[in-house]
Image: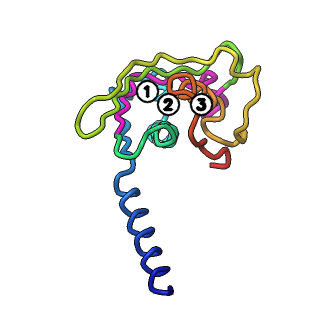
Amino acid sequence: MMMKKQLQTVIAAALCMGAAAAWANVEVKFVKPEEFVDIGSRISVRTSEDSLKFISEALTERANAILLPGQDMTIVVKDVDLAGDVRPIGPSMDNIRVIKSLYRPSMQFSYTITQDGKTVREGVADIQDMGFMDHYNRYFRSDPLYYEKPMMDAWFDKEFGAPAKRVSALK
């Protein structure tokens, strides 16, 4: 009886490891990010690199939530316009982001989902959130993509159906 229980445990562990190995691979690419509305020359290099990292992580988390085991997704980001407008202020002309409903977030990207080397779905997205200040936002205000993440969530939900699992708001 004890041997049977141990064998079941070993088989279960092996299946879990196999499933993890077959899980999704998400790749986010940026096409000419220096020309993006909110990543380009108006913003410091450090801020640009951070913004690209945060956007890549957010898209990867949402893609992983909708992909089936064995599927891969490539997202090619063509433009990003974060909520608000960047303006220089003060004697050192530091950039600050002024948030007003006029300056809504938007993103343009394409995606391809493959499985076993074959394309199973592809599309183009041109998303924006015109009411980004008017609806509930479950993310912390300190999140660098506080206004953009709900926009991404809404697009993924609409494009791929109700989320199988949802990215944590605590990240």
Determine whether label 2 and label 3 are within 8 Å by CB.
Answer: no
**Which residue is drawn at the image coordinates 34% and 40% (left, top)?**
72
Say which amino acid is labelled 1: Gly
Please provide the residue range marked out in magenta.
72-97
Q: Is residue 90 magenta?
A: yes
Residue 40 numbered mark, or none: 1
Tell me residue 56's x, y (percent).
45, 39
Residue 43 numbered mark, or none: 2
Q: Is residue 87 magenta?
A: yes
Tell me residue 114's x, y (percent).
30, 34
**Residue under pointer 3:** 162
Say which amino acid is labelled 2: Ile
Separation of disc 2 and disc 1 at Cα? 6 Å
Instruction: State whether residue 99 is above or below residue 58.
Output: above
Outermost residue, left side: 117
Determine whether label 1 and label 3 are within 8 Å by CB.
Answer: no
